Amino acid sequence: MAKIGSRKTFGSLRVKAPLALQGQRIGVMGGSFNPPHDGHRIVAETAVKRLRLDQLWWLVTPGNPLKANGGLPPLADRMAATRRYARGPRMKVTSFERELGTPYTAATLAFLKRRYSGVRFVWVMGADNLASFDRWQHWRSIARTMPIAVVDRPGWRLKALASPAAAALASCRQPESEAASLATRQAPAWVFLTTRLSDLSSTKLRDGKR
């Protein structure tokens, strides 16, 4: 397996991630948020409530390795837009991947586990991401690094649950009724959360603007 990140980068104080206290439950939801919308907010709020999180970090990424990023708005603009949806004291908006110097989730999560050894992290993503999860770099390593919460998105439930990644991780899936304990479970472990749905998507919003 290829190396994920370096000890020097992981220990660097220039990587300014939010404050996290030992024993806290923290969800991490990454994306380009171009633009953020109510669908993202629903995913975040569902995760906080159902997983009983102390914090939910909206990780605004420099770019998506699986998408063309030529027309991506500046990071500062996307962070400002994201703050309008990340409402409440438990929601934190961060862009520490810029200092970390990687666009890959596997490296980001490895950094978090190394820096915050006493924190219980959960990776949070929408069902649309589970559908293509097997295309992510080191996706199996991601699943072994921290538990994963997959939140339903309109039109994606069946595709997500029939995806190669879902099949590969089927034995690690936890009942939705036990979602509150996900943060305390040893990875690999994941849960699929049903919730109210919003048919908004960043792609639709960009197309409408054009």
Image (cartoon, rainbow, N blue to C red):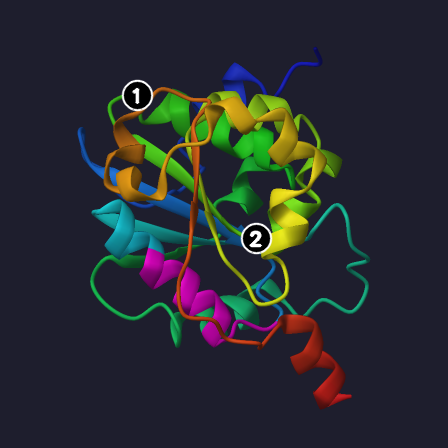
Q: Quadrant of residue 128?
A: bottom right
Q: Is residue 109 visible?
A: yes
Residue drawn at the location 46% of the way across and 50% of the way down? 29
Amino acid on which disc 1 is placed: Ser
**Where is mark 2, residue-wise?**
127
Q: For numbered disc 2, what is the local secondary structure?
A: helix
Q: Position of residue 92 (x, y in %)?
A: 33, 57
Q: Residue at the far top: name it.
A: 1
**Where is mark 1, residue-wise?**
117
Quadrant where the N terminus sits is top right
Q: Reading the chain from its start, which is encountered first: label 1 or label 2?
A: 1
The residue segment tinted magenta is: 35-46
* Residue 44 is a magenta residue: yes
Q: Tell me: residue 133, above or below residue 205.
A: above
Asked whether 154 or 144 is in front, the reply is 154
Looking at the image, residue 135 sits to the left or right of residue 202; the answer is right
Badge 2 density bin: few <14, some 14–19, many ≥20, Cα 10 Å:
many
Asked whether 111 or 176 is in front, the reply is 176
